[in-house]
Amino acid sequence: MCGIWSHGNTSRNLNYDLRTGCDRTEISANENTLSIRGSITAKCTRSSSIHLDSNPLQNQSNFCVFWDPLLDLLIVEVNGKNHILCEPKSLQGSCCTDLSQEYQKKASLYGIVKGSIHGDIINNDVMEIYTFIGDSINCKETFCDEASQKSRGANMIEEVLMKSNTTGRVDLPCAQGTVIEMEEGFTGLNLTLPAPRSVDPNMIPSVYLPSCLKSTTKIKSKVVCTYYKEQKLFQGGPPDSTLLGGIVGLSVENKTIKNLPEPVKIRFHHSALPSNYSKQCVSWDTRKDSEVNWRSEGCETVIISVTETECRCNHFAYVTVVMQVEQKATRHLEAPTFITAVGCALSLVSCVVLLYWLSKRRGKKDHSLLVHRGLVVATFFLCLCFSLTSTLANTGNETVCKITGTLLHYLLLSTLCWMTVEMFHTFLLVCCGFTSSLPPWVFYLAGFGIPAVLVSRLLSIGDIYGFRNIMTSEDATSLYFICWMLDSDRSRLAHFIINIGLLAVVVSSGAVMLFIVATKIQNRPEWRKNRMAFLSIWGLTCLFGTTWGLFNFVLLTEATLSLFCIINSCHGCFLMLRYYTLEWMKKRCELSLDGGSTGSVTVQRWCVYK
């Protein structure tokens, strides 16, 4: 209610006597006193008098009485100055509102002129007393109903939560929120949002608030995190997408949050989607759009698992995950996936056959056979584990996927280490003319032990292995998962240091060794005669791991991706072809030597190696 208080030129006071309940409320005025009395509050009980600033030349004052029953907040404004009679409390369930006029008393000279409610004039005469009678209602439900009818109803909810003089959990029928007070030394916070009891605890979103949110100019500031399970406050958005779960609203007291140096992380839990649908993090920034308009700008989508998505946003807004209804084009992955599956199957069969053939020759004390067997075993289990990783990932079991990702990484490192052992062993035989006299355990330590040490170290660090999403295109997120290293800062650092570092050593050293060995044997008569040049170079290229450079050190196009899949998925098959070809060439070489051909020392060494 507002009006003009007609008073005398003497000192003036604001008197109030407020009690709990929901009965009559009286607003009155006379020559020197403006009074408010009655039972209207939920918890506030106060009675006092406030001296008002007076001006001897002024005999009229504008005043307004503001009553917010949801917050139990009562403010009287006199000549632009606010006087808080009841401080804001936590949100009230039952409150006194729907105030209606009951009794009015006219005044002769001093009183209230042009009394109005919400701008509508009640009476132009000078009135001494206005009496109102209230009705007790469920304030929270009424407030939610009003908010749902407004285009920016969610803003109303967050403003009320921000005004409430409370911290911690706040519940409304349409939303649940947490009010957090950031103090000096705020270092960031992880929290799980409050939610209705009907929501599965495993499906409740969690939020990470970075330390950069704290204002350096304020000692304390509030953050409101609100969870909206129902979507009725957010009707609208693109017709080709559907909200996948609830919505999380974020706001900071009296501050616009944008371009954060460290993003806010919101993790959503949801049901698994069909493989031809995509998920994307979107936000509605009410500063840019008055109506609901979900945008992907400013939010990065990070797929944690088939049932978990993390949104990393550099601004505060209403954030959720949408499911794109239309099918996404993933045809550019279909061919490489099929090639990889067929190649791994061929490699598995080839490795079994080759391992059987090498095992039949175990009676010979030859380190070459030991090294060959180590590489074949590592390649077999690498192809087997890689073939199963997508299937195991889509089961959604985090523990199984972590174990599978760890095993896959170990087998990849083991395969690369055995390639390195093969490389230097070949170099010693062909170029230096002697075989290694090291005991067998040294080879096993290099091929199986070193990778075990590296992987054990990563496991001790933690947050390295788990679900990993494969991006199918630049603008869509495919739901194709494997069990591998996570898309986290620690995992990326480990990948570049260990995987890329070891691969760079293998590929660069392999290329050098390949050149040296090929130069040594290029003048061999049988090599030219039997026209085995292409097959020999090809076999050495696969053996020394130089084909892995197609993926990591060559510009990745669809052509190189397909070539990479063909060459490296069929790695076991090429090993078998190479070993059988070398065995055939060895027999030809021995026949040539037995027939009287002395040959060069290098040729004899090459026969021995084969």
Image: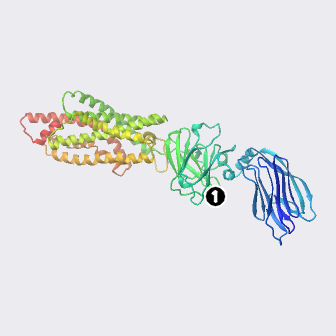
How crowded pointer 1 is (Cα within 10 Å; few <14, some 14-19, many 20+) is rated as: few
Residue 242, x across and y down, in percent: 59, 45
Quadrant housing the N terminus: bottom right
Q: Is residue 588 visible?
A: yes
Q: Quadrant of the C terminus?
A: top left
- At which x and y percent is residue 209? 55, 50
In this view, the residue farthest toward the left is 596
Q: Is residue 421 above or below residue 299?
A: above
Please say if 157 is above or below 29. above
Asked which quadrant contains residue 108, the reply is bottom right
On the image, the x and y values in percent for residue 421 come to 25, 40
- The answer to which of 589 and 331 lies nearer the viewer is 589
Snapshot quadrant of residue 415: top left
Q: Is residue 495 left or right of residue 358?
A: right
According to the picture, the residue beneath numbered tag 1 turns out to be 254
Q: How many marks?
A: 1
Name the residue nearer the viewer: 184 or 257.
184
Q: Quadrant of residue 338?
A: top left
Could you tell me which residue is drawn at 33 percent across and 51 percent down? 554
